[in-house]
Amino acid sequence: MGLFMKAESTSAFLKMGIMGFAGSGKTFTATSTAIGLVEHMKEAGVEYAEKPVFFLDTETGSDWVKPQFEVAGIPLFTAKTRAFKDLLAAVKEAEKESSLLLVDSISHFWKELCDAYMASKKRNRLQFEDWAFLKQEWGKFTDQFINSPLHIIICGRAGYEYDYFQDDAGKKQLEKTGIKMKAEGEMGYEPSLPVLMEREMEMETHKVFRTASIIKDRSTAIDGKKFHNPTFESF
């Protein structure tokens, strides 16, 4: 045969995206998932599971979860930066030196890319023709994210999607239509396992818990499911 060959499963690495508003449990859930995955790989005898977890940190989140890695006996290496160029370099370094890369928050890298571009043009707002360049630059990361032989978990802030509709009086009205990750427009769809985290409270007891909604699971195993206070076992 020429172009085609017998199908094989080649997707062996987790590409997970966790989005949510402040306090929804993004960093905690990403951490517990990372630790659980590394422990799972160790039990399976995966050689590179002994390498450290790399945490690309824009919000000092690694300071708060460091004790969890210490308890698990997993070395944690961090880089605190928001520069887009560092995001690209981090994936390449993590492929060679780590068992897993955790990025928190991807939203800051997108903002830095846009801000740096506007500064280079001496402008304070983006114009329509700028988006082609910015999307092309951001595409360098999404190509790495999708194709990298590395487990990658990204966290991103959530934002509302809006759209116009026509009311009974014929006037256009703006309303919320959904929630998306605050990053380049297509980023929220790139992970094979995108998850929405939400903070909820039982009004009678005032007990707070976090809920993970599976937006999409390409394996379909947990697609559309919800988990309260999720752990690695949930996924």
Image (tube, rainbow, N blue to C red):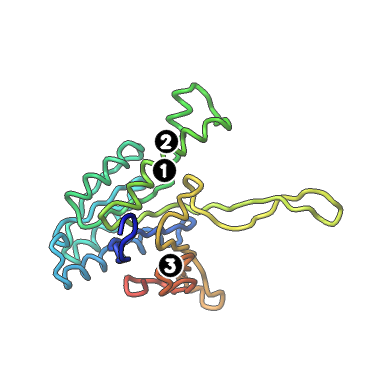
Residue tagged 1: 108
Q: CA distance from mark 2 to mark 1?
A: 9 Å
Mark nearest the camera among 3 and 2 is 3
- Indicate which disc, 3 or 2, sits on the residue closer to the N terminus: 2
* Residue projecting furthest to the top: 122
Q: Which amino acid type corresponds to the residue marked 2 in the rendered image?
A: Leu
Q: Which amino acid type corresponds to the residue marked 1 in the rendered image?
A: His
- Using the image, tell me which numbered label, if any, was put on residue 217: 3
Nearer-the-camera pick, 79 or 171: 171
Q: Could you say whether the residue bearing mark 2 is in a helix, strand or loop?
A: helix
Crowd band around label 1 with a 10 angstrom C-alpha radius: few (<14), some (14–19), many (20+): many
Q: In which quadrant will I find the N terminus? A: bottom left
Mark nearest the camera among 1 and 3 is 3
Residue drawn at (20%, 68%), measured in percent from left and top?
Answer: 41
Residue 125 against residue 97 in the figure, above or below: above
Residue tagged 2: 113
Position in image of residue 185 (x %, y %): 51, 47
